[in-house]
Amino acid sequence: MTYQIAKDLSIRIIKEEIFILKRSTSSIHSFNKTGTMIWNLLQEKKSYSEITQLLLVKFEIAGEIIENDLSEFLFSLSENQLIIMTA
Amino acid sequence: MYITEKYLKLGQEFHPTNAMWEVTSRCNAQCEYCYLHDSKNTSEDFNTNQMFEIIDKLFESGVLFITLTGGEPFMRKDILSILEYLIKKDFFSISLFSNGTLINANHLRFLAAYSNYIRNIQFSVFSHDPKINDAYFGITGALENTLCIGKQLISKGIPVTLALNLFNFNVKEFKNTKRIFTEMGFSVRTSFNKLCLDTEQEERINNELTKDFYTVYLDGFSRSDINKMQSRLKEKTEAIQRNGYFCYGLFTNIAIDFMGNILPCIAFRKLFLGSVFELRSISDILASSQSLKELRSLRKKDITNCTHCSLINECTFCLGMMHTRNNNFKKPLSQYCTYLKTLEKYSCSV
């Protein structure tokens, strides 16, 4: 699975808080610290497994939990059209 | 955390996310109650480069949403350059307050091309009757022009709000006016609050906003509408008590007046936190402002003239309007008191 950041986004980082505006829907999104970290990794074009590995190292919790949470987060990003997921 | 909570947190750390900016004091209209009435057309506008400097400063401080107002923003020959620069900086949204009479085909083309950056354009109106509307503005053809431009903007996907400010001459018909404009596809916002700069202006406004005025205004609503108004007032004051501060905007908003002064919001005409042209960042200016610190820590019990009022729990007076009139926070404008007392008597009698 590969992930592409959607094109019609405006992104601002203010005091480490990220705000993303999707212009076509006028929806504004913001994430917690972990979400922001994952977003930054997506911008660096990291794959699912690379992101999982990095999260495992950072959080030292069970891989299954990380994978579930990451999948849920990526699904939510895709549902809000912030990323495009392609097989 | 909800996004609005994040905006509040940023505001508490002196990064306002909303800014209202007077890009000029010049205006082609002659509205009698305009708070810029005496300063209108008296000062020179900042040049385009100075405007870009202000935009850079606002961007650096974290402003996401910006509203351009005046005076009349379209009096500026470089308004499209200013809008273009705002768009290039990628502010989340731009709103405009205008009288709509100076927007030409070129402006329209530009706004349509960048419609996904324009959150809303608000036009001031005073009546659905062109004679009444145009007489107040002092501009022949004002209403026809504004409505024509407004409809074109709506057709290009730009939301347009008509702001109907109420006076004795239009309050009786305001429901009808609102209906007519709504049927045309506009959102309509009505208000009657008027900023007073001095005693003379306050006297004139108090002669306008009397118990009879408010009674006529309230006559335009059903019993359930009146109940909803009172509930909303109570909810708002309960929120103030829960949150411990007067107004969310004191944290999330700033305003820049036509002289480059930084204000807590546009209603604070005499409370300057600093100048946008200082070498310091806007955030540093806000962080070091003792006035802002005092403002943010104000509570209802500090408004000494109100503490024994039976309506204090329903009152949502504006601190900005209070300070502009009195240069202090000791008593509210009597237009608030008259409105609340009329609303209370009205809801008991209906």
Image (tube, coloured by chain):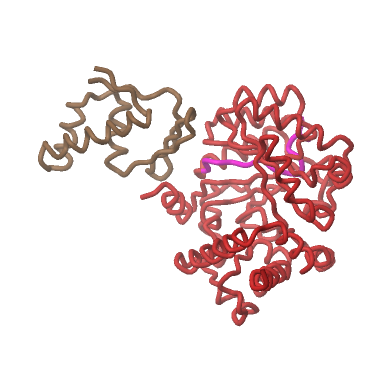
Chain colours: A brown, B red
**B72 falls in the magenta region:** yes
Q: Residue at x 51, y 63 (%)?
A: B235
Please tell me which residue lies in front, A38 or B202. Answer: B202
* Residue nearest the viewer, comparing B236 with B330: B236
Chain part drawn in magenta: B63-77
Going by the image, does B56 lie left or right of B124?
Answer: left
Which quadrant of the rendered structure holds the C terminus of chain B? Answer: bottom right
Q: Residue furthest bottom?
A: B308
Establish if B264 lies above or below B124.
below
Instruction: Tell me if B179 is positioned left or right of B4 in this view.
Output: right
Q: Is residue B38 visible?
A: no
- Answer whether residue A9 is visible to the viewer in this image: yes
Residue, x 59% and y 46% (percent of image)? B19
How many callouts does the rendering have? 0
User: In which quarter of the view is residue B187 placed?
Assistant: top right
Name the spot of residue B3 as percent of width and height, x first. 42, 46
Residue B252 place in picture, x, y as percent: 52, 52
Residue B327, percent from left and from top: 70, 68
The one nearer the camera, B71 or B157, is B157
Q: Tell which of B227 and A19 is nearer to you.
A: B227
